[in-house]
Image (tube, helix red, strand yellow):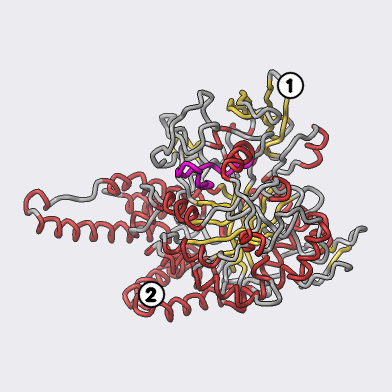
Amino acid sequence: MVDELIETKDGLKLRKLVELKTSTAEEYQNAMLDRVEYFKKKNQQKSVFNSTIQNTVVQGLSTILDLKIQAEKALGEENMKKVHDFLDEFLLFGL
Amino acid sequence: MYHLDGTDVLNEKYYRKTASLCPECLERIDAVVQEEDGKIFMIKNCPEHGDFKDIISSSAKYYKWTHYQMKNKDGTIAWQFEKDGEANPADCASDDDRGCPYNCGLCNEHLSTCSLALIDLTNRCNFNCNFCYANVQKSGYLVEPSLEEIDKIMKHFRSKPIPAPAIMFTGGEPTVRKDFPEICKMAKDNGFKEVIVATNGYGFQKKDGGLEWTKKVYEMGLDTLYLQFDGINNVTYEKTRSIKNLMPYKMRVVENCRKAGLSSINLVATIVKGITDIEVGNIIQFALDNIDVVRGITFQPVSLCGRITAEEMDELRITNADVIKEIENQTGGKIRMDEAWYPLTTIVEFGRLIAYLADVEPVEFTCSPDCGFATYLVVDPDTKEMVPIMDYFDPLKIIDFANRFWDKVKHKEKQPIKFFEGMLGDMGKTLDTGLNFLDKTQLRARFLLGMLQYTKKPGKLMEMFSRLLLNGDWESVSSFTHGTLLLSSMHFQDGYNMDIERVKRCIVHFGVAMPDGSVKEISFCTMNTLHRENIEKQVAKKITKKVKEEFDTSTGQTREEIEQEVAQNGGIRKEE
């Protein structure tokens, strides 16, 4: 399971901790996607993952996020702070 | 902790008054919580038993951060980690003049609702851990509620104005009960969203029939195992559980859950200084290696029961701050103490807002900020590395935005729009329903856009997070947690460090069916420190033939006999 082990005097095996092994990172995403498939099959049309409207909204949000990340890179930190402040006020306006 | 950088808070010595218990006589006494030498201590005096001093946090900076109050320009508190809960009506009268914690039941001093209901299913166990508070061999009597009593307790928790969303079966070892599958079904039938068992793995790991049993309890409604898991080395378990070669036993639990499709195990490590604190990195790596079935890890610094000397206290006491510092050390600095960890109360307003917008039951984490800390590990889509979820977001900005948003819309929760009702009667009600739907839709859109502006990474996990914000539903929550690893550290109180202000905010409550037909609801820490013995003596039962036919630890078996039983059931060779 772990490559580098240190053994103490009383036989306790400790992992030599330099960094977390992340070779299983893909499996995390797969575990999540497997769960989505599980709900899709189990709950059929009742599943939120089978909702066309919701899937479209989520895709839309994902696209907005991509654009936002690119915009942040282009605008720089100072300008983005101003944009965030403006958006905060705009989104909270009238509530 | 960057809240505090540049503020005067770091230079000011922390000090506050509270109430506590004398660890000897368990009488309520005054106490102070104060900073000394970069640490936080509780200091108190009992007129009869003298002075007591116990460490609350080994990091004053971290502690001060969790008690930080963000102020408005006019000096009022804009935000803090300590939240006001929405308490259910009291269940019992406050008969004892001494007040909290002697009136547990719950009384009207309690400030939070129950988020996790606990039922001790039995005090029988196939292990005999020396620090366990609930053990038939030590108590000398059997505590085991009947199915009717269990149903009554479940209905108690679910019938409150704010019902408990989750239930955990505790013990002893709950899976020694043959009717355990029926109890899981009963929990689902009573409407609990999440059904959990705190287990050493006994029922799940059996070589003969363990897999079939695991499938059965999963089908009957069990969602999650809180699996006792002290480390990856047999020698660790020899020290903590006095049983040899226990890792194959734990591995069989994981394997059987994997085969049965029960993909939600939370590893629970009792952290003892010098014994299991050196295993925290190993446990995290074990979780990463078994991510298809392991959803999280809960580190629990050991509570100290019974009388101990000041020297023993120094040797044994370990705090949440020690644990998360050790995690930073043992993960090569990946999970940073000063940035990755947040008190559980951080997400209170966030949770309320999602519950309101999505029309789902809220889950209230209005415990004390001292109770515990948590972080999520997630996969960075750019580097494929595991990183704390804080790398995904600007956490303070997100929290701040959610708090301001909730502050502006929370009145709508109790006062929905009623524009047409007065004018058009029933027709008006229908129109108002439509108006409220449209209002919530525009609020969701605003909130989601607000969240997105402080999100730093794209990817599948963020898509799932968007769904979670949109729906707050179980499918989205469950799928999101399958793409992450939740790390938390929960320090339960004992007689030495009990803070009554913390007790009042407890969100983890035991339910006990009393002989007079009532149900007592008792906060976790006071149950184990103060009430357990008295309550158990009232509900103790005779050892029946039925009990004897089941796995029987109630008749004074020797340690060797218990180990042999475990060996037979778990395939552990004693001589190893």
Which mark, residue B50?
Answer: 1
Q: Which residue is mark 2?
A: A47
| Residue B524: in magenta span | yes
The residue type indicated by label 2 comes to Ser
Q: Could you tell me residue B315's position as x and y percent?
A: 81, 40
Q: Which residues are magenta?
A: B509-528
Graded by Cα atoms within 10 Å as few (under 14), some (14 to 19) or many (20 or more), the crowding at tag 2 reads some
Quarter of the figure with residue B332: bottom right
Taking the spot 43% from the left edge, 81% from the top edge, the residue there is A41
Q: Are marks 2 and 1 on the same chain?
A: no
Residue B333 visible in the current orientation: yes
Taking the spot 40% from the left edge, 55% from the top edge, the residue there is A83
Question: Outermost residue toward the front?
Answer: B545
Q: Secondary structure at mark 1?
A: strand
Question: Outermost residue toward the top?
Answer: B47
Q: Does B252 sit left or right of B257 as displayed? A: right
Query: In which quadrant will I find the N terminus of chain B?
Result: top right
Graded by Cα atoms within 10 Å as few (under 14), some (14 to 19) or many (20 or more), the crowding at tag 1 reads few
Q: Vertically, is B255 above or below B191?
A: below
Q: Chain of mark 1?
A: B
Structural distance between the alpha carbons of marks 2 and 1:
62 Å
Residue B401 visible in the current orientation: no
Q: How many marks?
A: 2
Q: Chain of mark 2?
A: A
> Viewer-proximal residue, B125 or B537?
B537
